[in-house]
C-alpha cells in the first residue's frame, strides 16, 4: 500500500488585516501567509546570521528565564516519551534566555548536537521591547507574542486549545497539520501525562509504523503541509493537530495564541474528563442512551433544545453568561463534593 | 397514535426475570408478581385495611409529601410562570398523611396528597420481611408511595426500576430514552423531583406548540396495573404515571448497576453544558468528535494502542482513580470560580 502524501496548505500573499479577518480566519482552514513578517527587524537579523539573530534578541532581553528543554544527542531532536512510556526523553528546566542563545550558537557548530528548545517565552516578561519594532498587523495588538528558540528539533503532533499564528524569524521549518476530527486516526497518547500539557499522537511522522497504527494512513490522506521560510507565517485554527520539524541549526519563531471563547465558559477538556469518569465505563446500551442525551442537550443535534421554554426559564440551558456559568459551577462543585459511598 | 400495549409476563421467576426480561432492556408488565403479599391483600380489602397495615408497621417515620390544591387536579407540575411549582413538599409524619388521605378518599374534588419514595427500612423495617419481591438482591431497598388521584409528569430515573401496585390502579406510559428529542424537556437543574420532565401534557397534548410529541407517542407503550401487578422500567426510560383510584399504594425498587464512585452521567452532562454547548458551532463540532472518540464510539478502547500502565484516566476505572479525577475536577472548578470573582 502506498503512503498518502499530505497536500499543501493554501498559500496567501500580501495579506492585509482585513483579508485575514474576512477571508482566512472564517474559512477555518490552515493558511500559509507568505512574507507576513518579512519586514520585521528581527527577521532581517535572522537572515544575516545566527550570531546577528542572537545579538538582536540579547539586546532586548531583560535577563528573564524561560521554560527550556534539553534532549540528549541520541534523541535526534525528537522530543517524546521514553521507551517505556514511564517518563520523557528530555529534561525541562527554567533557564535564562541569554544562556540559551549562547548555547544554541555553540551547538550550531557541532555535528551531532544535543537538542535545545526554549518554549513559549512570553515577550512582555522576557523581551518587552520586541513588540515595539516587530508587530503582526493581522491580529489585535494586545495579544501576547511568545518566543521559541531551538536547534534542529521535531515537535510531535499535538494541538492547542486556541487559534495560533506562528511567525518564522530564523531557520526553516516544515509544519504538517491534521484536521481536528482525525483524532481517531492519530493514536493519541495519554491524556493527563503529556509532554507539554496537551496530548500528542504516538505515531512518528517521518517513519510511521503502519502495521501498529494502520489508521494513520487515513490521517495522512487528510493532512496538509507547509514549508516555512523566515518572514512567513502560518495560521493554525483551533485544535488542528500540528507537527513541526525545524530544519536549521538556529531557529527562532514567534507565535500568538488567541481564543474567542468567553472566560466564563467552562473547560471542554475538564468536561471530557468528567464524562470519561462517569459515562465511558457504562455498559454499551446505557452509553448509547447518554450519547443521545448529549447529542440533544450539548451538541444540539436536533436544533435548539430549549426553544419551547421561555428565555428567562431556560436555566443552565439558556444563554451562558457569567451568572449562569457561576451557577452551574457551584452546582457541579456541590455534586462532586458529595460523599461517594 | 395510540400508545402500544406493553409486553406482559406471568408467573415470573427470578430466573425468567434475570435471563429473559432484563436482557431485553424493554419495559415489561409482570402480572400478579406480588399478588400474595399481605400488603396487597390488605389493599384489596379496603383503603382502611391497607392504612391499618402500614400504620402497624410504621416506627414513627416522616415522609416527603407533596400537597397540591384541588384545582391542580392531581397534576403536579411547575406553576404557570415557571418560577416555582404548583404544589408544596414537606416532611410529614406518615400516619398523619395516611389519616388525611383516608378522610378525603371519597371527596369529589380533593386536594392532592402524595407521599413519595419513603424508604421502608427507615420507616417500616418489617415490611420487607412480610412482603418479599424475590427478583432482586435483598440489598436493594423498597420505597413506598401513597397518594390519591395524582399524575406524575413524564420523567426518567438514572436507575432501573421495578414498581409494584399494592393498592388502587395505575396507568404507566413509557417512552424510550432516545425520545428525548421529541419530549420537549424542561429545565435540567430546576426540577420537580431531581430529574428533568417533559413539558407536554399526556392527557391533552398541545400539538401546535409541541408538534414532535406526535412522534414520541408512536413510540410510547402503555400498561394499566392492578393490585399485585408490577412493572419493570428500564434505565432512563421516560415514564408518566397516573393513579386511577381514590387511594393508591405503590412499592418500588430502584437499582443502579454501576458503582457510585463512577459519579453521575447527569453531572457530566451538566459539565458539558458549561463547557461545550456554548462554543462557536464549528468548535463544538470538534468536541463532538472528541466525545465520540473518547466516550461514545469506542469499538476498541481509545487507548488500546498504549501499554496498560500508560492509559491513565482511560484505564478501567477504580474507586481510587475516580476519586483522583473527582479531586482534579473540583480543584479546577474552584479555581475557575475564584478567578471569575
Image (spheres, coloured by chain):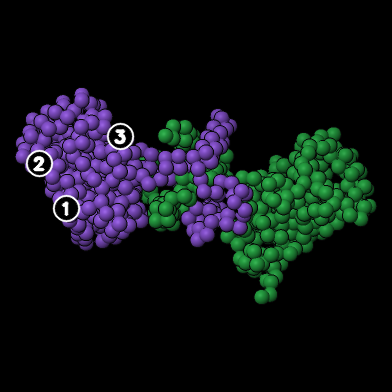
Chain colours: A green, B purple
Tag 1 secondary structure: strand
The residue to which callout 2 is attached is: B41
Question: Could you tell which of marks 3 and 2 lies nearer the N-terminus?
Answer: 2
Question: Could you tell which of marks 1 and 2 lies nearer the N-terminus?
Answer: 1
> For the point 25% across and 51% down, which residue is it?
B14
- The residue furthest bottom is A1
- Are the residues under marks 1 and 2 on the same chain? yes
Few, some or many residues within 10 Å of mark 1 (<14, 14–19, 20+): many
Left or right, residue B213 beside residue A324: left
> For the point 21% across and 36% down, which residue is it?
B129
Tag 2 secondary structure: helix
- Are the residues under marks 3 and 2 on the same chain? yes
- The count of marks equals 3
The residue to which callout 1 is attached is: B31
> For the point 30% across and 57% down, which residue is it?
B19
Tag 3 secondary structure: loop
Few, some or many residues within 10 Å of mark 3 (<14, 14–19, 20+): some
In the picture, residue A175 is in which quadrant? bottom right
Residue B104 horizontal/vertical position (percent): 9, 32
> For the point 73% across and 50% down, which residue is it?
A82
Q: In this view, does B297 lie above or below B226?
A: below
Residue A107 horizontal/vertical position (percent): 90, 49
Q: Mark 2 lies on which chain?
A: B
Left or right, residue B2 beside residue A66: left
Few, some or many residues within 10 Å of mark 2 (<14, 14–19, 20+): some
Left or right, residue B51 beside residue A284: left
The residues bearing labels 3 and 2 have C-alpha atoms spaced at a distance of: 39 Å
The residue to which callout 3 is attached is: B84
In the picture, residue B55 is in which quadrant? top left
Foreground tag (3 vs 1): 1
Q: Mark 3 lies on which chain?
A: B
Amino acid at each position: 500500500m502506498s503512503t498518502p502524501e499530505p497536500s499543501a496548505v493554501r498559500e496567501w500573499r500580501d495579506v492585509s488585516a482585513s483579508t485575514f479577518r474576512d477571508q482566512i480566519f472564517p474559512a477555518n482552514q490552515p493558511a500559509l501567509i507568505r512574507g507576513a513578517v518579512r519586514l520585521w527587524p528581527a527577521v532581517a537579523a535572522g537572515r544575516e546570521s545566527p550570531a546577528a539573530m542572537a545579538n538582536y534578541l540579547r539586546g532586548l532581553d531583560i535577563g528573564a528565564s524561560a521554560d527550556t528543554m534539553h534532549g540528549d544527542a541520541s534523541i535526534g531532536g525528537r522530543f517524546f516519551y521514553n521507551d517505556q512510556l514511564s517518563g520523557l526523553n528530555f529534561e525541562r528546566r527554567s533557564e535564562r534566555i541569554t544562556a540559551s542563545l549562547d548555547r544554541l550558537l555553540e551547538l550550531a557548530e557541532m555535528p551531532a548536537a544535543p537538542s535545545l528548545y526554549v518554549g513559549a517565552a512570553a515577550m512582555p516578561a522576557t523581551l518587552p521591547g520586541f513588540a515595539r519594532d516587530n508587530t503582526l498587523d493581522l491580529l489585535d495588538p494586545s495579544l501576547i507574542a511568545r518566543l521559541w528558540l531551538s536547534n534542529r528539533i521535531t515537535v510531535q503532533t499535538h494541538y492547542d486549545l486556541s487559534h495560533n499564528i506562528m511567525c518564522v524569524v530564523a531557520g526553516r521549518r516544515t509544519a504538517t497539520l491534521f484536521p481536528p476530527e482525525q483524532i481517531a486516526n492519530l493514536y493519541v497518547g495519554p491524556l493527563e501525562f503529556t509532554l507539554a500539557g496537551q496530548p500528542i499522537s504516538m505515531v512518528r511522522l517521518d517513519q510511521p509504523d503502519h502495521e501498529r497504527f494502520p489508521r494513520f494512513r487515513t490521517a495522512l490522506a487528510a493532512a496538509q503541509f507547509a514549508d516555512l521560510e523566515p518572514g512567513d507565517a502560518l495560521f493554525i485554527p483551533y485544535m488542528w493537530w500540528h507537527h513541526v520539524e525545524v530544519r536549521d541549526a538556529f531557529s527562532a519563531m514567534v507565535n500568538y495564541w488567541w481564543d474567542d471563547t468567553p472566560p466564563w465558559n467552562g473547560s471542554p477538556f475538564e468536561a471530557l474528563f468528567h464524562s470519561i469518569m462517569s459515562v465511558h465505563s457504562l455498559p454499551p446500551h446505557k452509553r448509547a442512551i447518554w450519547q443521545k442525551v448529549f447529542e440533544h442537550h450539548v451538541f444540539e443535534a436536533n436544533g435548539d433544545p430549549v426553544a419551547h421554554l421561555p428565555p428567562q426559564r431556560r436555566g443552565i440551558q439558556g444563554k451562558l453568561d457569567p451568572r449562569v456559568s457561576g451557577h452551574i459551577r457551584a452546582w457541579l462543585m456541590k455534586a462532586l463534593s458529595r460523599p461517594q459511598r | 397514535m395510540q400508545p402500544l400495549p406493553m409486553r406482559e409476563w406471568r408467573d415470573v421467576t427470578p430466573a425468567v426475570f434475570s435471563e429473559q426480561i432484563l436482557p431485553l432492556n424493554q419495559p415489561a408488565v409482570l402480572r400478579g408478581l406480588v399478588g400474595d403479599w399481605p400488603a396487597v391483600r390488605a389493599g384489596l380489602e379496603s383503603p382502611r385495611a391497607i392504612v391499618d397495615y402500614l400504620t402497624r408497621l410504621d416506627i414513627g417515620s416522616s415522609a416527603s409529601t407533596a400537597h397540591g390544591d384541588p384545582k391542580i387536579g392531581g397534576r403536579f407540575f411547575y406553576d404557570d410562570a415557571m418560577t416555582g411549582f404548583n404544589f408544596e413538599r414537606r416532611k410529614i409524619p406518615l400516619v398523619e398523611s395516611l389519616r388525611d388521605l383516608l378522610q378525603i378518599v371519597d371527596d369529589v374534588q380533593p386536594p392532592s396528597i402524595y407521599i413519595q419514595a419513603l424508604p421502608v427500612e427507615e420507616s417500616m423495617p418489617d415490611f420487607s420481611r412480610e412482603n418479599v419481591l424475590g427478583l432482586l438482591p435483598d440489598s436493594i431497598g423498597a420505597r413506598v408511595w401513597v397518594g390519591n388521584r395524582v399524575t406524575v409528569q413524564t420523567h426518567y430515573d438514572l436507575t432501573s426500576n421495578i414498581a409494584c401496585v399494592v393498592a388502587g390502579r395505575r396507568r404507566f406510559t413509557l417512552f424510550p430514552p432516545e425520545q428525548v428529542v421529541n419530549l420537549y424537556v424542561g429545565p435540567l437543574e430546576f426540577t420537580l423531583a431531581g430529574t428533568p420532565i417533559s413539558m407536554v401534557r399526556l392527557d391533552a397534548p398541545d400539538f401546535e406548540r409541541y408538534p414532535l410529541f406526535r412522534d414520541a407517542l408512536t413510540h410510547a407503550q402503555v400498561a394499566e396495573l392492578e393490585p399485585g401487578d408490577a412493572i419493570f422500567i428500564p434505565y432512563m426510560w421516560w415514564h408518566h404515571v397516573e393513579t386511577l383510584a381514590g387511594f393508591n399504594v405503590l412499592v418500588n425498587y430502584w437499582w443502579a448497576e454501576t458503582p457510585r464512585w463512577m459519579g453521575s452521567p447527569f453531572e457530566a452532562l451538566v459539565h458539558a453544558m458549561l463547557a461545550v454547548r456554548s462554543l462557536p458551532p464549528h468548535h463544538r463540532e470538534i468536541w463532538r468528535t472528541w466525545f465520540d472518540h473518547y466516550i461514545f464510539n469506542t469499538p476498541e478502547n481509545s487507548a488500546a494502542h498504549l501499554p496498560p500502565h500508560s492509559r491513565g484516566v482511560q484505564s478501567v476505572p477504580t474507586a481510587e482513580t475516580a476519586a483522583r479525577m473527582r479531586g482534579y475536577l473540583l480543584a479546577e472548578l474552584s479555581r475557575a470560580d475564584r478567578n471569575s470573582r
